[in-house]
Image: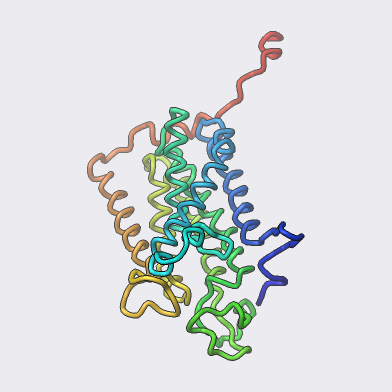
Amino acid sequence: MQPPFGPNLLELGPIIIRMYAIAILSGAMMGGWLGAHRARARGYNPNIVWDWLIVGLILGVAGGRIWYVASSWPQYRDGPFIDMINTTKGGLAIHGAIVGAVLTVIIASWRTKTNALTWMDIMAPCLSVGQAIGRWGNFFNNEAYGGPVNNGLPWNLNIPAQYRIRGTEQYDAATRFHPTFLYESFWNLGVLFAIVFIERRFRGRLRNGDSLLIYGVLYSIGRFWIEDLRVDKLCTGGVGGAACGDSLSTARLTSIVLIVGCSSLFVLRRALQRRPPASSYQQWDNPWQPEPSEPAKAAA
């Protein structure tokens, strides 16, 4: 398996449309659509989602880039500043993007005087949708792939020589590689359905913020094992490569922290307060309704 064309969908002089950007924007739009639907079901105006989506994109990209540069600091510390902010060659870390998304929710809830934890729950599966679609940008960039594999499965990746990173260039042209971007895309879809199922099955037992905690645990479990297959991982000791040696990759270390932290919070909240407050689930029965227009009021 390999992309039908290169990283760019269209090139007209200085105008370049990149598949990576299209994948990210498509994921954001689908996540926004799901978020608007979930907001309405919880009694919130769905327009709030669309109003803040562009802010979420900006902070998500900024957070992803900051996280990537910080994790690869030896590569950037002696170079020009423009290299630190140049994302045209990739270099976005998903955990930084998640931080940007969470920060957007906090700001939006503060400005709209709404419950931040409820918005966190609304956002949780939307992150999974965005990641599942956005990961296909890695496919067109010939990146985020794993080590060589010889099982003959049709979805294994053919990575052209010019796109192979250090540690994989020695393999012959017939070698295929793990499509780790695809594994993570499918895993995120699984996380989406798991969150929705848990919300429907156990909604009377959930507290505000639980869906985000569940997302943090489930996504991190998948990322932990998928990351072990990748050859372009960011290492805690500096710039990544084909392997991190004896150190954990940045993503694996972050996954451990999230699994332990989110699981602990989930349990601790129940230990301190055995019954969930009514505010945790009462909004589910009060879907948002638009205000009637002035003519409609007059006619009534």
Relative image position of residue 185 (x, y in whole percent): 55, 63
For the C terminus, which image quadrant? Answer: top right
**x%, y% of residue 267?**
28, 50
Find residue 204 and report its image quarter. Answer: top left
The answer to which of 57 and 82 lies nearer the viewer is 82
Q: Position of residue 266 (x, y in %)?
A: 31, 49
In this rendering, is residue 158 above or below 79?
Answer: below
Res 48 → quadrant: top right
Which residue sits at x=51%, y=77%?
Answer: 146
Q: Is residue 274 left or right of residue 244?
A: left
- Image quadrant containing the N terminus: bottom right
In the foreground, 192 or 145: 145
Q: Is residue 116 left or right of residue 143?
A: left
Q: Is 190 placed left or right of 99 in the picture?
A: right
In the rendered image, residue 141, in percent from the top left (x then y), is placed at: 61, 69
State the residue lying farthest toward the right.
12
Q: Residue at x 66, y 61 (%)?
A: 19
Q: Is residue 247 above or below residue 250?
A: below
Of 126 and 162, the residue lying toward us = 162
Image point (61%, 20%), residue name: 291
Q: Which residue sits at x=47%, y=57%?
A: 65
Query: What colour-coding does the image apply?
Result: rainbow
Number of dots carrying numbers: 0
